[in-house]
C-alpha cells in the first residue's frame, strides 16, 4: 500500500482541507486529490465528502472507521525505521519555532546534532515570541516549538528542556544604590522588558501596577538583544536571563540590581502536536533535550 497516499489521507482528515494538506506536504492540491482518489480506488471505498467551495472536507463514515487503522500503520512504519536506525531516512522539512533565549544559548549545538543525525533534512526556522510560536504549534504551521511552555492543550505533547533565571540589570551610569531596593525605587526609569502577550511581561506589569506611588513606564520589545542594548545604553532598567548577560557583567557595562522581588524563572519546553503522528518532531525533541542538558551542565561546571 502506498505510504504517501496513507500519509496524505491522515493530513487531509486532520486539517479538513486539500489545500492545507498540500501546503503541509509541500506539494500541489491536484497531487493531493490524485493521492486520495488513488487510495479510494485501492480500498474500494469513499473516504471524504467533497462539497466544494470553502466548506471543509468531511470524512465519510467509512473514512472515520479507517482513520485509526491508517494512523497505526504510519506509526508502526516510523517505529520500524527507528529500530533499523535509518537516521538518514529522515528527509523533507522540519518547521521549527524557537524563542530568542534558546537562539542565544544552545540552538547552534542542537542544529549541529540535527544535521549530523539527519543530513537530508531541511529546517525552516522561525524566531518569535512564545504566543506566536504556540499558535503555530496548535494550528500545525510549526512542527516543533522550543518555547516558554508548556502549551495546555490535549493534542500537544510537552517535554521539559531547561530553566533560566531572570535578573534585574542596568548600566552603572544610572548609579543606583548597591543595597536591596524596593520596586518603587526603580520607577523613575523605564522598565525594559519582554514583549506584550508574554508571561514575563504580564507578571512584571501586574506587579508594578500593584505598587503605590508613581506608576512605572514600560518599554516592551520582542528582541532580547535590543533589551540588552537599551540597558547598556542606560535607557532604563531591564529584566534579562542571567545566561545572556555574563559577558556584560564581566565587562562592567551592566550590573545586577538586588530587589525585594524578581520575576519567576523562564521554563522552556519542546512542544508539538501528535495528531497526526509527528516523527520528525519526536526525533528532534530527543536532540533538543540533549543539547539543553549539555548547555546546563557546562554552566554548572563553570560555576563549580
Image (cartoon, grey):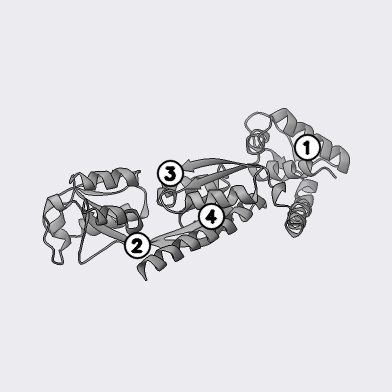
Distance between the Cα atoms at labels 1 and 4? Answer: 30 Å
- Quickly name the residue at label 3: 128
- Around disc 2, counting alpha carbons within 10 Å, would you say few (fewer than 14), some (14 to 19), or many (20 or more)? some
- Mark 2 vs mark 1: which is more N-terminal? 1
Distance between the Cα atoms at labels 2 and 3? Answer: 20 Å
Residue 141 left/right relative to 12: left
- Mark 3 vs mark 4: which is more N-terminal? 3
- Mark 2 vs mark 3: which is more N-terminal? 3
Distance between the Cα atoms at labels 4 and 2? Answer: 21 Å
Q: Nearer the viewer, mark 1 or mark 3?
A: 3
Is residue 206 in sight in this rendering?
no
Distance between the Cα atoms at labels 3 and 4? Answer: 15 Å
Q: Position of residue 287 (x, y in %)?
A: 57, 56
- Quickly name the residue at label 1: 36
Question: In which quadrant is the C terminus drawn?
Answer: bottom left
- Quickly name the residue at label 2: 165
- Quickly name the residue at label 4: 271
Label pair 1/4, CB-CB below 8 angstroms: no
- Around disc 3, counting alpha carbons within 10 Å, would you say few (fewer than 14), some (14 to 19), or many (20 or more)? some
- Around disc 4, counting alpha carbons within 10 Å, would you say few (fewer than 14), some (14 to 19), or many (20 or more)? many
Q: Nearer the viewer, mark 2 or mark 3?
A: 2
Q: Position of residue 141 (x, y in %)?
A: 56, 42
Residue name at image x 37 percent, y 51 percent: 198
Question: In which quadrant is the N terminus drawn?
Answer: top right
Is residue 199 in sight in this rendering?
yes
Question: What secondary structure is found at the residue carrying circle 4?
Answer: strand
Q: Is residue 6 above or below residue 165?
A: above
Label pair 4/2, CB-CB below 8 angstroms: no
Amino acid at each position: 500500500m502506498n505510504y504517501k497516499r496513507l500519509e496524505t489521507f491522515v493530513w487531509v482528515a486532520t486539517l479538513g482541507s486539500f489545500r492545507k494538506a498540500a501546503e503541509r506536504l509541500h506539494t500541489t492540491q491536484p497531487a493531493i486529490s490524485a493521492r486520495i482518489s488513488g487510495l479510494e480506488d485501492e480500498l474500494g471505498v469513499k473516504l471524504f465528502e467533497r462539497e466544494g467551495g470553502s466548506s471543509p472536507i468531511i470524512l465519510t463514515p467509512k473514512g472515520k472507521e479507517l482513520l485509526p487503522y491508517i494512523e497505526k500503520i504510519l506509526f508502526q512504519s516510523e517505529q520500524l525505521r527507528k529500530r533499523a536506525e535509518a537516521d538518514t531516512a529522515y528527509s523533507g522539512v522540519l518547521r521549527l519555532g524557537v524563542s530568542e533565549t534558546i537562539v542565544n544559548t544552545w540552538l547552534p549545538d542542537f542544529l549541529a546534532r540535527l544535521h549530523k543525525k539527519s543530513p537530508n533534512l531541511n529546517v525552516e526556522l522561525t524566531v518569535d515570541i512564545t504566543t506566536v510560536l504556540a499558535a503555530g504549534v496548535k494550528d500545525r504551521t510549526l512542527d516543533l516549538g522550543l518555547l516558554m511552555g508548556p502549551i495546555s492543550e490535549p493534542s500537544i505533547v510537552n517535554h521539559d528542556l531547561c530553566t533560566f533565571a531572570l535578573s534585574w540589570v542596568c548600566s552603572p551610569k544610572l548609579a543606583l544604590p548597591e543595597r536591596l531596593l524596593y520596586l518603587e525605587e526603580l520607577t523613575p526609569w523605564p522598565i525594559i522588558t519582554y514583549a506584550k502577550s508574554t508571561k514575563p511581561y504580564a507578571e512584571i506589569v501586574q506587579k508594578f501596577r500593584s505598587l503605590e506611588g508613581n506608576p512605572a513606564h514600560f518599554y516592551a520589545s520582542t528582541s532580547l538583544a535590543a533589551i540588552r542594548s537599551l540597558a547598556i545604553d542606560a535607557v532604563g532598567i531591564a529584566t534579562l536571563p542571567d545566561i545572556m548577560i555574563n559577558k556584560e557583567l564581566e565587562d562592567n557595562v551592566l550590573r545586577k540590581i538586588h530587589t525585594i522581588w524578581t520575576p519567576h524563572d523562564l521554563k522552556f519546553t519542546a512542544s508539538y502536536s501528535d495528531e497526526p503522528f509527528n516523527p520528525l518532531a519526536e526525533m528532534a525533541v530527543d536532540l533538543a533535550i540533549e543539547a539543553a542538558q549539555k548547555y546546563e551542565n557546562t554552566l554548572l561546571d563553570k560555576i563549580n
